[in-house]
Amino acid sequence: MSTRRMIAVVVLVPVLAALALWAFAWPAARTAPRDLPLGVAGPAAATSQVERRLAQQDGAFEIHRYADEAAARDAIEDRTVYGAIVVTPQGPALLTASAASPTVAQLLQQAVAKQAAAEGTEVKTVDVVPAPGTDPRGAALNASVLPLALAGMAAGAAVTLLGLRGIRAVTALVGAAALIGVTAAALAHSWLEVLTGDWWTEAAVFTLATLAVSAAVAGLAALIGAAGIGLVSFVVMFLGNPFSGASSAPQMLPEPVGAIGQWLPPGAGASLLRSVSFFDGAAATGPALTLTWWAALGLGAVLLGNAMKSRRPSTGPAPAQELATVG
């Protein structure tokens, strides 16, 4: 038995290390625009040349056409596109939104500036929705993904290992998530000042993102045992965190990594936090529903697991009164 355990450790640890390197290093090494939503605004005759040049970049951009600069600005503020190239009589202008992704905003500036330099023109850049001055690169928001995931896993594991069941487990999960959400909002909004939206809405997002993970951990553990803790933790850590696109954008990750990441709590939580903090809730419905489903299914599994255990017949010794009656 000891030999088998030794072999298991020798084999499993390198396998886990390889999986971690694959999950984190591969998307980072393959970061590039893939059908990245980008607007082109202006008269059709003037924008056709710009569209042709963008189309030559092997599917890097998904082109959205707008009549004028105002329409392009509205699309950026609605999170329909990450930026827009506006063709005007005075020359081209680039609209960006560093609050949506500083990485994408920088990429667009470099791409357009390179093209403009080749043509001998200058491009005016306007940051329509800028990132806060206290966090211009979005580092603090990106860094919040992992701690929230860890907090959710810890809360779900604690509820399971402490033996809480049914309503007690649900109450503990919701209460812990709410406290984590308020604390996170106090740190990120009030202290660090890296978020600029409504304080209570941001706290609600932190709460929901934490609850989505903690409920999933406790719920699966209630159904299949302690192995559920490891399974959900693996999905959240090895897939949800590196596939979240928080440091760049989902469309900057290899396919289908970006799409998968948005169906997992870390990616949905990061997208929802950007929407409520910088874009007045634009494009918040999708990630909010994703987190809600994770939380609801997890809490439902906690209650279901408790109900299933309570219905199992007892296999312990019969009560003394019953033994006396039989005798």
Image (spheres, grey):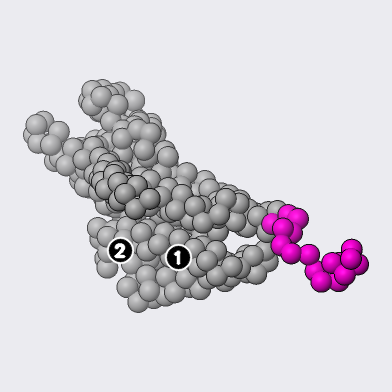
User: Is 283 on the left-hand or right-hand side of 175?
Assistant: left
Label 1 Cα crowd, 10 Å radius (few <14 / some 14-19 / many 20+): some
Q: Which mark is residue 154?
A: 1
Label 2 Cα crowd, 10 Å radius (few <14 / some 14-19 / many 20+): some
Q: Nearer the viewer, residue 278 or 244?
A: 244
Q: Nearer the viewer, residue 224 or 295?
A: 224
Q: Are marks 1 and 2 in contact (CB under 8 Å)?
A: no
Q: Which mark is residue 140?
A: 2
Residue 135's spot in the image, x, y percent?
Answer: 27, 64
Rendering quarter of residue 322: bottom right
**Circle 2: residue type:** Ala
Rendering quarter of residue 148: bottom left
In the rendered image, the quadrant that contains the C terminus is: bottom right
Q: Nearer the viewer, residue 143 or 93?
A: 143
Q: Can you tell which of label 1 and label 2 is closer to the viewer?
A: 1
Residue 195's spot in the image, x, y percent?
Answer: 38, 66
186 in the magenta segment: no
Please say whether residue 128 is visible from this viewpoint: no
Q: Residue at x 21, y 40 (%)?
A: 29
Please say whether residue 138 is visible from this viewpoint: yes
Q: Specify start and end residues of the magenta stretch as a single range.
A: 309-327
